[in-house]
Amino acid sequence: MGIDTSEVYEGLVHSQLNLGQFEEARKNLTVGLGKNPDDPDLFTNLGHYYLLTGKYDEAMAVYEKYKKKKLDNKQKFRQVVSDDLKEFERLGFGNSHFDQVRKNLRID
């Protein structure tokens, strides 16, 4: 439809992560961040991508950088990460690092 903004990529990547399409999500993260390298929603999904693919240190580096920020929808970063982790677990994508992320970010 001719719409090619970072917001489109944020939604696409989030859906791909929820579907377990991690490599497709990585590719679209690259494109989206190329369009808007400061998009906090895309960086949240980048942290999720790292976490879901077993790259805990990379995930925590992203999460630590953004943990005090509000996202474009005015939600607090920590609440979004908390909600997303619960959803990933519900979908069967949880891993041994989820509890450590919660502890480090002080989220439930």
Image (cartoon, rainbow, N blue to C red):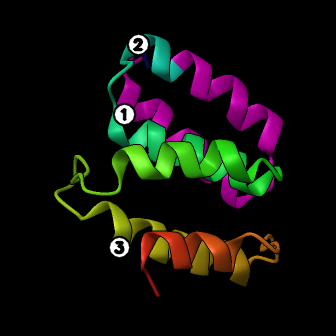
Q: Secondary structure beneath disc 2?
A: helix
Residue 16 seen in render: no
Which tag is nearer the camera, tag 3 or tag 1? Answer: 3
Whole-percent x and y of residue 102?
54, 77
Cα distance in 3D space between marks 1 and 2: 10 Å
Task: Inspect the magenta stretch and tell me whether residue 107 lies in it.
Answer: no
N-terminal label among 3 and 1? 1
Whole-percent x and y of residue 48?
61, 53
Residue 9 seen in render: yes
Label 2 amino acid?
Answer: Lys
Point 25% across, 64% down: residue:
76
N-terminal label among 3 and 2? 2
* Residue range corresponding to the magenta coloring: 3-31
- From the image, tell me which residue sits under label 2: 35
Residue 72: image tag = none
N-terminal label among 1 and 2? 1
Residue nearer the viewer, 81 or 11: 81
Decide: is 10 above or below 5: below
Point 35% across, 47% down: residue:
66
Which tag is nearer the camera, tag 1 or tag 2? Answer: 2
Q: Magenta segment, principal secondary structure?
A: helix
- From the image, tell me which residue sits under label 3: 79
Q: Secondary structure beneath disc 1?
A: helix
- From the image, tell me which residue sits under label 1: 7
In the picture, measured across the screen, residue 16 lies left or right of residue 35, that is right
